[in-house]
Image (tube, rainbow, N blue to C red):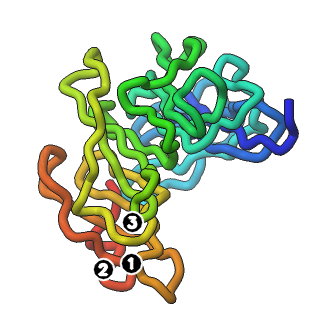
Amino acid sequence: MGSRNRDLNMVSARSCQFFEFAAVAGCMLVTACGTIHNASQAEDPVSDAAPSPEVSDGAMPPRAFSTPVPIAELNSNATEAWPALTDDQLEIYFSSDRPGGEGGYDIWMSKRVSVDDMWQAPSPIATINTTAGETHLAVSSDGLQLYYTMVVSGSMTGADVYVSARASRASPWPAPTLVSELNSIGNENGVSISRDGRLFAFDSDRGGASGRDIYLATRPEPSAAWGIPLGMSETTFVETRIP
């Protein structure tokens, strides 16, 4: 396996999981931490760590993560990057340039029966993937909307945001559509969607001389169109914070 490939890392706990990617030798990694719980809940029976100080909303902050370890069923000799999990942690989506896709970076997905089970063998999403390359993924918490960015050959607008929306988790992903209200003549990347589906964050170089900046867009409900994206200098975190 090539040591310069970028691969996914997974951070897990009984109540939460987190995925990232890193330049390591061809492997997805997993690490664990203590449970995040409310102060009214019983102390974690399997942890020897002392309870963390209570924060203002009554929730306990997470304990330290352990050292990541590989997840062999999701890794390949190629690159795995930009992972995204559904809220129930039973589906994972990521971009990979492994063989079996349409070419370049394609979106792959895997499922598992429960958070304690192994992931199934990843498969490419044929209805979405193209030879153009699909990267920078974000999936809605309910697993019904999948966002990503793509540069279409011959386009004058750089990397744009696309979305595929399905009716249910049992439904296949339909052909994607361009999210025109989020895009510009520049490049949009680094997409992220809030748990309630009403806040969308991404980075863009649409500002020209200012380089890449973070932009936020909101909508009244998950089925509505996104509003005009605003740069972080034009809004405040308090007004647009992710739940």
> How far is the residue under mark 2 from the one under mark 1?
5 Å
Closer to the chain start, of discs 3 and 2, is: 3
Q: Position of residue 89 (x, y in %)?
A: 45, 27
Q: Position of residue 61 (x, y in %)?
A: 53, 50
Question: How would you rate the neighbour count of disc 2 (Cα within 10 Å): few for under 14, some for 14-19, many for 20 or more?
Answer: few
Q: Secondary structure at mark 2?
A: loop
| Above or below, comparing residue 2 to residue 120 in the picture | below
Closer to the chain start, of discs 1 and 3, is: 3
Which amino acid is tagged 2? Thr
**Residue 73, quarter of the rendered image:** top right
Question: How would you rate the neighbour count of disc 1 (Cα within 10 Å): few for under 14, some for 14-19, many for 20 or more?
Answer: some
**Residue 13, quarter of the rendered image:** top right
- Residue 235, numbered circle: 2
Residue 29 in view of the camera: no
Q: According to the image, label 1 marks what residue?
A: 232
Compare residues 124 and 7 and report the one nearer the observer: 124
Q: Are marks 2 and 1 in contact (CB under 8 Å)?
A: yes
Which amino acid is tagged 3? Thr
Q: Secondary structure at mark 1?
A: helix
- Please give the name of the residue rendered at 29% of the width and 67% of the height, measured from the top-left corner: 240
| Above or below, comparing residue 127 to residue 160 in the picture | above
**Residue 96, quarter of the rendered image:** top right
Q: According to the image, label 3 marks what residue?
A: 157
